[in-house]
Image (cartoon, rainbow, N blue to C red):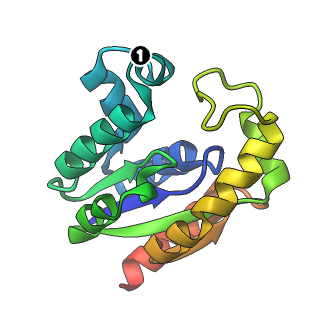
Amino acid sequence: MNIVLIGYRGTGKTTVGKAIARRLKRRLIGMDDLIVKKGGMPIPEIVKRYGWERFRDMESEVTNEVSELDNCVIDCGGGVVLRDENITNLKRNGIIILLTADIERIIERIKDDSNRPPLKDGITFEEEQRQVIEERQESYLKAGDYIVDVSDGSVDEVVDKIVQFYLDI
C-alpha cells in the first residue's frame, strides 16, 4: 500500500515524503518530477505553452501510472484533488495523508519559489493563495484519510504521526 501525500503548495509534501521514504525504506515518487519528465520542460513552461488544462491532463496520466505502484511514498502536486478520478486512482492502492498549514506559513514558504506558476490572474499573490486554498478546501478534506497540520512541530514529529497512522491501519 502506498502512502500518498496531498495538500496545498508549501505544506511540506516533498520534505515529509523524503523523510517517510527514508524511515520506511521506500521509494519516493514525486509526481511533479514525473510531469516535468513527461512534458520535457519545467512546469511553468508547460503551463505557459499549453495551459493549465493540458497540465491537469498530464497530472491525471501520471496519477494513473503511479497508482499502479506499490509500497511507495507519493508526493502529489497541490492540484491533484481537482479531478475526482485522481483521488479514486490514488485510493485504489494507497492511503491519502492531507498536510495542512496556516495560510501565513504557506505564503512565507512559497513566496520566492519561481517554479510555482500563478493559478489566477489579476490579483495579488496573497489573494491568490487565500482564494485557491478556500476553493480546494472541501476537496482536500474529502480526499484525506488522515489530516496532519504541519504549521508547528518538526518534520520528525509529522513523520511520526503519519507512520503511526499507517502502521495502525
Q: Residue at x 75, y 25 (%)?
A: 112
Residue 154 visible to the viewer: yes
Q: Please state which amino acid type lies under the numbered disc 1.
A: Arg
How many numbered callouts?
1
Locate residue 57 relative to residue 116 in the image: left or right: left
* Residue found at the far right of this picture: 104
Please determine whether, in this image, residue 35 is positioned above or below residue 126.
above
* Figure quadrant of the C terminus: bottom left
Out of 7 and 124, give the one closest to the viewer. 124
Q: Where is residue 166 in the image (x, y as percent from the top left)?
A: 40, 75
Q: Position of residue 51 (x, y in %)?
A: 43, 27
Q: Which residue is drawn at 52% across and 48% down?
A: 78
Locate residue 34 relative to residue 128 in the image: left or right: left
* Residue found at the far left of this picture: 68
Out of 47 and 105, give the one closest to the viewer. 47
Q: Residue at x 17, y 53 (%)?
A: 69
Locate residue 157 relative to residue 38 in the image: left or right: right
Locate residue 58 relative to residue 147 in the image: left or right: left
Q: How crowded is mark 1: few (under 14 residues within 10 Å), some or many (20 or more)?
A: few
Q: What element carries label 1?
A: helix
* Quadrant hosting residue 134: bottom right
Q: Where is residue 67 in the image (x, y as percent from the top left)?
A: 21, 56
Name the residue that disc number 1 marks: 49
Q: Residue at x 46, y 55 (%)?
A: 20
Q: Where is residue 96 in the image (x, y as percent from the top left)?
A: 41, 68
Out of 164 and 5, give the one closest to the viewer. 5
* Quadrant hosting residue 109: top right
Please determine whether, in this image, residue 85 is positioned above or below residue 9.
below
* Figure quadrant of the N terminus: bottom left
Please determine whether, in this image, residue 58 is positioned above or below residue 162.
above
* Residue found at the far bottom of this picture: 168
Residue 100 visible to the viewer: no
